[in-house]
Amino acid sequence: MKIYIAILSILFSIPLSAQEEWELKKDKNDIQVYTKSISSSKIKAYKALMTVKSSLNKVKDVIIDGDQLHVWNYKAIDSKLLKKHSESQYLIWMALDLPWPLRNRDVVVSLHIKRITKNVLRIDMMSASDQYEEQEDYLRITSCEGYWLLEQQGDMVKITHQMHGDPSGNLPNWFVNSTITRAPYYNFLALKEKVE
């Protein structure tokens, strides 16, 4: 049990470190979204939490299904699995619709799945923009990192998603930070519908 607690303590301390505490920004429909400042960036990180009635594998399968990510990700207009390196490593591309006159964005992420215990799974996400050629219609997001932490608790799964990135281009920081709770909240609403 002590090892399990130590592992979880380490998990929650990386990869996004900062001096400030998480601040609850939205608590609605059993979904909590927090933000905090990151010392190395003017863009805030977010962390979203919810618990769903589902199984660990079902939630994981939806999260790593690159061809269907755009169906439930907020403002996503296209997505695809670029490469499945192994059962634990995937390369995914997704395109995002931004309001006019802003240019639409795309992002390439590497997903790495780690089974921590029988009932705990972590999916690390890291920008891999150099792994797929840039698309003419999109401005590439080159900086993002985060993770999904899935914990089976009986017939429920506790989901934690933490992310930090820079949307690239000339987006005002105040604009990005003012909308940072919207995407995880709507992503979680849609994810809940798919897995319950």
Image (spheres, rainbow, N blue to C red):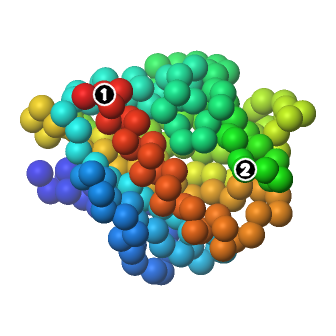
Q: Quadrant of residue 164?
A: bottom right
The residue depicted at 36 percent of the width and 70 percent of the height is: 24
The residue depicted at 52 percent of the width and 27 percent of the height is: 71
Q: Indicate which disc residue 137 carries.
A: none
Label 1: state its secondary structure.
helix
Q: In this rendering, would 179 be left or right of 121?
A: right
**Does any portion of residue 85 appear in the rendered image?**
no
Q: Give whichever of discs 2 and 1 has the lower sequence position.
A: 2
Name the residue nearer the viewer: 41 or 48: 48
Instruction: Residue 143 in the image: state x and y as whole percent.
Output: 70, 53
Q: In this rendering, would 65 be left or right of 122?
A: right
The residue depicted at 53 percent of the width and 22 percent of the height is: 68
| Badge nearest the viewer, 2 or 1 | 2
Name the residue nearer the viewer: 1 or 89: 89
Instruction: Residue 85 in the image: state x and y as whole percent.
Output: 59, 20
Image height of 24 relative to 99, above or below = below
Q: In this rendering, would 74 be left or right of 161?
A: right
Q: Indicate which disc residue 99 carries.
A: 2
Q: Indicate which disc residue 195 carries.
A: 1
